[in-house]
Image: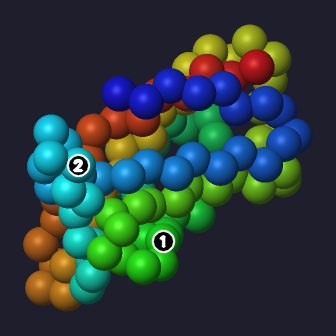
Amino acid sequence: MTRLTIRRGGTRRLRATLFANLAAGLRRDLTALSALVVDQSPNIAVPAITVRSPPSAGEIEVIWSDEQTAHLKPGAGRVWLIIGLENGEGEREVLPAFTFDVE
């Protein structure tokens, strides 16, 4: 689980590296996969999710813009996001949930 704070009215960017073998430091190749939101907390807008270039580096990026975070109330607690990867045949792999504290 990943934790970070989302400040109201501010752009928030999360970059995560997915590993094929964490112990060996081998990054997963995300070529031909797309990233998508599978489920999320209802009190925040859907972020933009992309596979970063080059996809062989195994990184995804999640961005909430200023406008998306402006309506969050102070002390709103935690928001969560479940991300998935999908291949061209529609096969989906769900990644672990990311949890965020709202400030």
Relative to 90, residue 10 above or below:
above
Tell me the CA gap for discs 2 and 1: 18 Å
- Residue depicted at 64% across the width and 41% down the height: 44
Q: Is disc 2 surrounded by few (<14), some (14 to 19) or many (20+) residues within 10 Å?
A: few
Q: Residue 56: x percent and y percent?
A: 31, 75
- Under mark 2, the amino acid is Gly
- Residue depicted at 44% across the width and 61% down the height: 60
Q: Earlier in the sequence, mark 2 or mark 1?
A: 2
Residue identified by numbered label 2:
25
Q: Residue 40: x percent and y percent?
A: 45, 42
**Local secondary structure at mark 1:** loop
Closer to the camera, 74 or 28? 28
- Residue depicted at 12% across the width and 72% down the height: 91
Relative to 1, residue 68 above or below:
below
Residue 35 visible at all = no
**Local secondary structure at mark 2:** loop
Give the numbered dot on residue 2: none
Tell me the quarter of the picture where residue 10 sits.
top right
Residue identified by numbered label 1:
52
